[in-house]
Image (tube, helix red, strand yellow):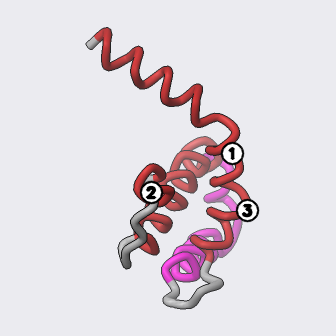
Amino acid sequence: SIKAIESSSKEDDTMWLTYWVVYGVFCIAESFSDLFLYWFPFYYVGKCLFLVWCMAPVPWNGSQVLYHSIVRPCFLKHHETVDNVMSNISTKA
């Protein structure tokens, strides 16, 4: 999905690809912290509001904000390493 977002051809699916990348990062982070977070009152309400904000059909929705401020800089910093690891895995497979 990140490769599709960063490709030169921009189509209307970029918004949803951005959402799925942010949602995937959120799910990974949540899997580590869910044991503690579900004890907080209104955690699931906050989670639902966060996901609705990420899906909102406005230019400043959560997916765009989080992708451009957190996910993209991290990906651009480490994308060569990720590509090398993936090519090594595919060679061994």
Q: Earlier in the sequence, mark 2 or mark 3?
A: 2
Image spot of residue 27 (x, y percent): 51, 53
Tag 2 residue: 7
**Which of the two discs, 2 and 3, sits closer to the camera?**
2
Magenta extent: 35-55
Q: Quadrant of the C terminus?
A: top left
Name the residue at 58% across, 81% down.
Answer: 53
**Residue 49 forms part of the magenta stretch:** yes
Measured in 3D between alpha carbons, the distance from the residue under mark 2 to the one under mark 1, in whole angstroms, is 17 Å
Q: Quadrant of residue 91?
A: top left
As for residue 59 lying within the magenta part, the answer is: no
Q: Is residue 3 left or right of residue 63?
A: left
Disc 1 crowd rating (10 Å Cα; few below 14, some 14-19, many 20+) is few
Residue reaching furthest to the bottom: 58
Q: Identify the residue at horizontal 67%, vertical 64% (top origin).
A: 68
In this view, the residue farthest toward the front is 8
Element assignment for label 2: loop
Disc 2 to disc 3: CB gap under 8 Å: no
Q: Earlier in the sequence, mark 2 or mark 1?
A: 2
Mark 1 or mark 3, which is nearer the start of the sequence? 3
- Residue placed at 65% from the left, 44% from the top? 76
Q: Which mark is residue 74?
A: 1
Mark 3 lies on residue? 69
Cα–Cα span, label 2 and label 3? 18 Å
Quadrant holding the N terminus: bottom left
Q: Nearer the viewer, residue 80 or 69?
A: 80
